[in-house]
Every structure is written in C-alpha cells, then in structure tokens.
Image (spheres, coloured by chain):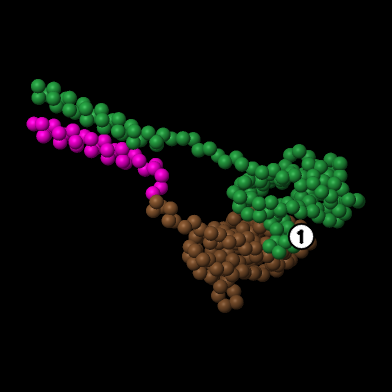
Chain colours: A brown, B green
C-alpha cells in the first residue's frame, strides 16, 4: 500500500517536472548554438552607362551561402540629374560574354534593396538592362551586397 | 481511511505539480517589444558655389528612413537649390544621387526615403539659380 502511494506521488511529480521542462523553451541558447558562424557581407558598387536597349553586368563571387541583395541606387542623366525611371535588374551566372539571368525584375531607383535572392557559394553576375523605357543613355549605380 | 489517504496523496501531488508548472512557465510572460528609435542627426553647414555642389557622407547601421531638411540657404526662404541623397562612389570621386528635389529652406524635411544599412551621401547643388556664393545649413536624420 505504501509502495503504491509512493509510485502514485512519483508519477505526479514526474508530470509536473515534464510540464516545467516543456515550458523552459525560453532559456538561453546552449553552448552548441554559439558555434553558428555569422555571415560576413561584402558590398560592391557597380556603376556605368546604360544605353537605350542596352545592358550591362558585373560578376561577383559568393563565398558563403546566404542572401544577396541588389539595390539599384541611382539612374541619372549624363549631366547627373537623378531620374526615377524603371530599368531592369537581375541575377544570374556569367555565360560567355554575357550574364544568363535566372531572376530579374523592373524597378525604379531607391536606397533599399529591390531584389534579394539566396545563393550558394559560386560565381554570379548582377545585371542591369533597359526594358524599353530608355530613349537615351543613362548613368546608373547599383549596390551588390553578398556573403 | 483508504479514501482519505488517496485524497491526501493526490492533493499533495496536484499542489506540487501546479507550483512547479507555474515556476517553469513564469519566464514566458509576454512582453511588449520595444522598438529601436535610435537616430542620429548631423548638421551640414558650408558654402555653395555658383554652379557648384557640396557633399557629405554618413553611415547607416540599420535599415530605416533618412530625412533631409534644408534649414537655411543664403538667408532666403525663396531661393531654390537642389538637394539629393545617394551613394558615394567607392573611389571617393562623388555622390551618385538616387533621389533629388529642388527645395527652399524650411523646417520640414524636403526629402525622405527608405535606406538599408550602408554608406550614403547627401548633396546640395546649384540648379542655376545662384548669382553668388551662398551659405547653407541642412540637417540629416538617419537610423543608427
């Protein structure tokens, strides 16, 4: 009888402990978590002239898998006046003398990334191209941020 | 007697279980996240030459909004000059403007735009309205 009571009490305590353990998910990360290496990013500026119906690209090497951000920061007249006209930007892999884009979109210039893609280590290219809106050459500046 | 003993043991176990559960979950009390309101304000004051431009760069350490206010230019409230924000070229040869406006001095931001982490520049330039060198003052508020 005493034994039975002991087991019953023990079972209740076990339930309580398990409940407590289930609630402890907010505890500090264990030592093993600290082995995660934070990504280090490199920022490049790709600037040049984009002709009407033209395109340009810039190759870069991704060292670690992670997010790559493209920011079409500026499109300007040759005189330096900021324009707010849309042009195409994209990411791909260098192919021959060009850039075979796997992702692309049309965007107006801004200072927050318009395109973010996750890439594995390797060589890639960032492209800028006229989508049919240009009637004359413009200058552009694009920021590429990659791990 | 047996029923009383059963009740006593069960009650003790329930009390213990409840207290341990409360202790275990105590740290999960929801809290209201506090937004990070940190911004830096820099005042850029210098002279603007006829047909010229003047630039200053600044570092943004978290994404947010940048606002630029042309506080004074040539002691006039009607004189229009160009005001822009962009990125500095890597070789230090200039500031490529992403957005620009023609503005007169005032107390409300004439230019405001979203930015990511990175280095940026603000530029004031003559749009052809100046007849002489003028003093100017502008402020830039950006997230840090």
Q: Residue furthest bottom?
A: A96
In the image, is residue A19 part of the stretch drawn in magenta? yes
Q: Nearer the viewer, residue B44 or A5?
A: A5
Instruction: Count every numbered label the image shows and give the total.
Output: 1
Q: Tell me the residue that label 1 is attached to.
A: A80
Q: Residue furthest front?
A: A31
- Residue B88 lies, in percent from the top left, at 70, 58
Q: Is residue B103 visible?
A: no
Residue drawn at the location 75% of the way across and 44% of the way down: B43
Dot 1: what SS? loop
The chain to which mark 1 is attached is A
Residue A26 to residue A44: above or below = above
Residue drawn at the location 55% of the way across and 61% of the way down: A146
Residue drawn at the location 68% of the way across and 54% of the way down: B120
Q: Residues within 10 Å of mark 1 (few under 14, many from 20)?
A: some
Left-right relation of B44 to B9: right
Magenta segment range? A1-30
Q: Nearer the viewer, residue B44 or A83?
A: B44
Left-right relation of B57 to B50: left
Quarter-of-image position of residue B138? top right
Quarter-of-image position of residue A23? top left
In the image, is residue B60 part of the stretch drawn in magenta? no
Residue drawn at the location 16% of the way across and 25% of the way down: B7
- Residue B1 lies, in percent from the top left, at 9, 21
- Residue B14 lies, in percent from the top left, at 24, 29
Q: Is residue A126 visible?
A: yes
Residue A12 to residue A38: above or below = above
**Main secondary structure type of the part rendered in magenta:** helix
Quarter-of-image position of residue B35? top right
- Residue B144 lies, in percent from the top left, at 62, 46
């Amino acid at each position: 009888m005493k034994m039975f009571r002991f087991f019953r009490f023990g079972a209740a305590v076990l339930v309580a402990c398990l409940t407590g353990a289930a609630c402890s998910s907010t505890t500090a990360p264990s030592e093993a978590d600290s082995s995660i290496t934070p990504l280090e990013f490199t920022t490049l500026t790709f600037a040049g002239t984009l002709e009407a119906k033209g395109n340009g690209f810039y190759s870069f090497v991704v060292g670690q898998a992670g997010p790559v951000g493209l920011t079409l920061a500026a499109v300007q007249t040759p005189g330096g006046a900021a324009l707010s006209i849309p042009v195409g930007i994209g990411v791909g892999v260098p192919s021959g003398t060009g850039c075979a884009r796997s992702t692309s979109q049309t965007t107006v210039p801004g200072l927050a990334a318009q395109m973010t893609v996750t890439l594995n280590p390797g060589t890639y290219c960032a492209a800028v191209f006229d989508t049919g809106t240009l009637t004359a050459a413009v200058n552009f500046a694009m920021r590429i941020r990659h791990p | 007697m047996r029923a009383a003993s059963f009740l006593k043991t069960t009650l003790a176990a329930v009390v213990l279980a409840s207290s341990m559960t409360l202790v275990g979950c105590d740290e999960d009390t929801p809290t209201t996240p506090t937004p990070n309101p940190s911004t830096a304000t820099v005042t850029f004051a210098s002279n603007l030459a006829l047909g010229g431009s003047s630039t200053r760069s600044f570092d943004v350490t978290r994404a947010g909004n940048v606002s630029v206010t042309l506080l004074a230019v040539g002691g006039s409230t009607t004189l229009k000059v160009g005001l822009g924000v962009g990125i500095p070229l890597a070789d230090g040869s200039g500031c490529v403007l992403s957005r620009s406006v023609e503005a007169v001095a005032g107390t409300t931001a004439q230019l405001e735009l979203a930015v990511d982490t990175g280095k940026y520049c603000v530029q004031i330039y003559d749009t052809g309205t100046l007849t002489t060198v003028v003093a100017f003052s502008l402020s830039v508020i950006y997230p840090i």
